[in-house]
Image (tube, grey):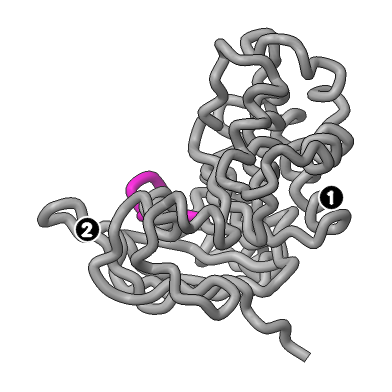
Amino acid sequence: MTAQPLLSVEEVSASYGAVRALDGVSLTVPAKGVCAVLGANGAGKTTLLRTLTGLHPATSGRVLLDGEDITRLPAEKVITRGLAHVPEGGGVIVELTVEENLRLGGLWRSDRRDKSTLNEVLELFPPLAQRRGKSASTLSGGERQMLAIGRALMARPKVLLLDEPSLGLAPLITEQIFTLLRDLRDRTGLTVVLVEQNAAGALAVTDTGFVLNQGRVVAEGPSSDLLSDDRTRHAYLGF
């Protein structure tokens, strides 16, 4: 039996002036799914995430989260509906401590004074628990990415969107971050959408994949199928 989609993107288009960055993109992500969105620079991957989260307006189409149309909601309302976004580079505030960065992620929650979520996130990320009172500037690149993901989890999202989490990380750390995403799904039931240029690594840890090219979906299917499809890999994924 096929799982019902938790996130549905229906014919979404978005533009920057006269340039159409997304051109009728449609995709679905089931609950507890780990999905890769792949493509070269300029394919529309980051614009897709920004459009889903209300940071960039859609010119047409719909975004449904758990059946609710969130297409026209402002970004702060999208967060409260259950969609969290970790942007490229993570956006960690190095002047704040690890714990202060994490607490920022729960600001939109009505129960933000409840410490249980903070404790749960620290349990998921032991290196952060060990440094909770330290400045974020003392963290390694991999630890900063953990902090960015942990901060997003503080909002208790239904779906976590990650934009290039492997950027600038060593291959071993990248592998650890990718494995962590599947572990999060298995332990918490989280649904994950992973935007990546590291296509081979992303397909190895995700269930399904979508390939964008010039703002359109040009291939989709089980990640294992995309990984073994020589034509798609050579034409769009560069390996």
Does the segment drawn in magenta span residue 58?
no
Which structural element holds mark 1?
helix
Examine the rendered structure and indicate whether residue 21 appears above or below residue 210.
Answer: above
Between 114 and 132, which is closer to the camera in this rendering? 114
- First to last magenta residue range: 38-44
Mark 2 residue type:
Ser
- Whether residue 239 appears in this view of the structure is no
Residue at the image point whose x is 38% and y is 75% from the top: 62
**Residue located farthest toward the bottom when viewing the structure as drawn:** 1
By secondary structure, the bulk of the magenta-drawn segment is best described as loop
Residue 227's label in the rendered image is: none
The residue wearing badge 2 is 15
Looking at the image, residue 21 sits to the left or right of residue 230; the answer is: left
The residue lying toward the viewer, choosing from 198 and 110, is 110
Q: Is residue 184 above or below residue 165?
A: below
In primary-sequence order, the first of circles 2 and 1 is: 2
> Residue 90's spot in the image, x, y percent?
55, 32
Q: Is residue 43 magenta?
A: yes
Q: Which residue is mark 1?
A: 183
Question: Looking at the picture, which amino acid does disc 1 mark?
Answer: Asp
